[in-house]
Amino acid sequence: MLKLCTLPKSNGRRLFSSALYLTGDKAREQFAVLVPYLDFKHKLGDLERLKRNIRLRKHQLDFDNLIHQWELYRDVEKRKKEIEQCRVELQKRIQQSVCKEEQQQLKSRAILARDDLKMLKEQSYKVADAFIANNFLSIPNDLHERTPEERWHCLYEKSAPVRNTRTPNVDLVQEQFEEFSPTCLYLTGDAAWMDLQLPMHCCETFRQNNCILFCNPDFVRSFLVEAAMVSKESLFLVREDDEPADKVNLLHLCGGGSLLSFLGYFTKLSVFPSALPLRLVASGKRYHFQRAQSNEVHVFGACKSAQEAEGMFDDMVQIYKQFYDQLPVGYRIVQVAAPNLRPIEAMRVDVELLDDRKQRYVKAAELGYYTDFLSKRIAFIYHEGKVQHFPHVIAGTAMSSVELIKLLLSNGIALDDLPMINPFEKK
């Protein structure tokens, strides 16, 4: 039996046990689904670049504590290697020695070295947990050169078309959006038809541009939530009756129209280089804690190199434009600035629709570039010869039905103003 609930608050104290990275002591009791690729050289090789990245993003990671934990971790790992090397040398000397007394002395030293190593390994689990789970895996992605440092800038803008439209009617939105609670919403009339037709038309637009229709699950495990650096408090937690009290890899409700739902398929997946690039699109629900569910269309792409991924990113933006050009609304595409990026994103563009009634822009869609950062966290790989590589990933929400339909209706745009999706339009 499954039961939806929320994660308990920590009362200001950080009570964190990672499901993405399990140390050896925890792995004895918890199942380790995957081991993320820990690229220490890239992330910590240039500390000035890292400090700048954290500063521009206004990220909450404590840089000084990160470096302190990194030094402790390196010191422990160095001592472990020294003891292991000592044990190897002692074993060689025992085999070469012909004197029984000397052999006995060497064996005694080898036993002490073994005990020291065992004790150090037990102590190293806490050090590794403090550094990797609580610090290293919180390091954000590198900023892309196209990401503005402080303020967004507009890449494209389309004015609202001149048309004979109905008078904006807020009452129509209230009539067709029956909200019983923040998470319970019932659509009627034109809103219900739009909720059905708009995602289908959006998917068809991407399919006509060489994207493959995909179907994703509604549930995801905690390790993928951590891999995507999403707050667990933003998702519904699914309690299972036979779930152990100390289980860390819990089940969450996310919906099939989200990035999280794609990750389950690509985790620990090895693909042939000939399978890349991948261009996928999926339509499904998106569940948010304390917000109504929505029908959303999510795209996912994977490429072998950064150059290919940037090209695909620009191609996807053109498909976004193709879809939103068909709607009788003004909109703009903006390049998001560093402080507004999610930690996992290297760059992102947002599609913002013009709300004529309130004379403001409302975010309707987004597309992010994740470099190979996400692939390393979920062990998504491809091989060229014997060399292992990580694909570069782009992904984003192409449309979210609830906010889009509210904007259309409140600005007097009804179903018969959208002939490309109107099931009653005469041809």
Image: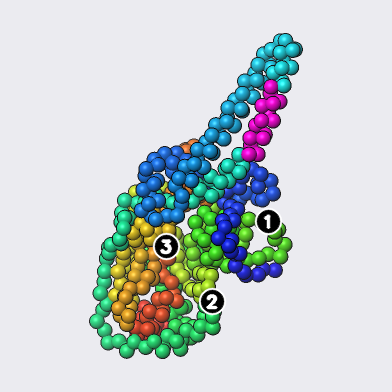
Q: Which mark is residue 183?
A: 2
Quarter of the picture holding the C terminus = bottom left
Distance (Cα) linking label 3 and label 2: 23 Å
Q: Residues within 10 Å of mark 3 (few under 14, many from 20)?
A: many
The kind of residue on which mark 2 rests is Thr
The image position of residue 156, as x and y in percent, is: 27, 66
Q: Which mark is residue 396?
A: 3
Q: Is residue 207 magenta?
A: no
Residue shown at the point (71%, 13%) measured from the top left: 102
Q: Residues within 10 Å of mark 1 (few under 14, many from 20)?
A: few
Residue shown at the point (65%, 46%) measured from the top left: 27
> Along the polypeptide, which appears first: circle 3 or circle 2?
2
Left or right: residue 389 versus residue 160 is right
The kind of residue on which mark 3 rests is Gly
The part of the chain drawn in magenta is: 109-123
Q: Residues within 10 Å of mark 2 (few under 14, many from 20)?
A: few
What residue is disc 1 on?
Answer: 246
The image position of residue 330, as x and y in percent, is: 29, 75
Residue shown at the point (43%, 80%) measured from the top left: 194
Circles 1 and 2 in contact, beta carbons < 8 Å: no
The kind of secondary structure element at disc 3 is: strand
Pick the front one: 20 or 70: 70
Observer-side mark, 1 or 3, equals 1
Distance (Cα) linking label 1 and label 3: 34 Å
> Along the polypeptide, which appears first: circle 1 or circle 3?
1
> Along the polypeptide, which appears first: circle 1 or circle 2?
2
Residue shown at the point (27%, 87%) measured from the top left: 164
Quarter of the picture holding the N terminus = bottom right
Q: Is residue 308 above or below residue 360?
A: above
The answer to whether residue 388 shows anywhere in this view is: no
Distance (Cα) linking label 1 and label 2: 29 Å
The kind of residue on which mark 1 rests is Asp
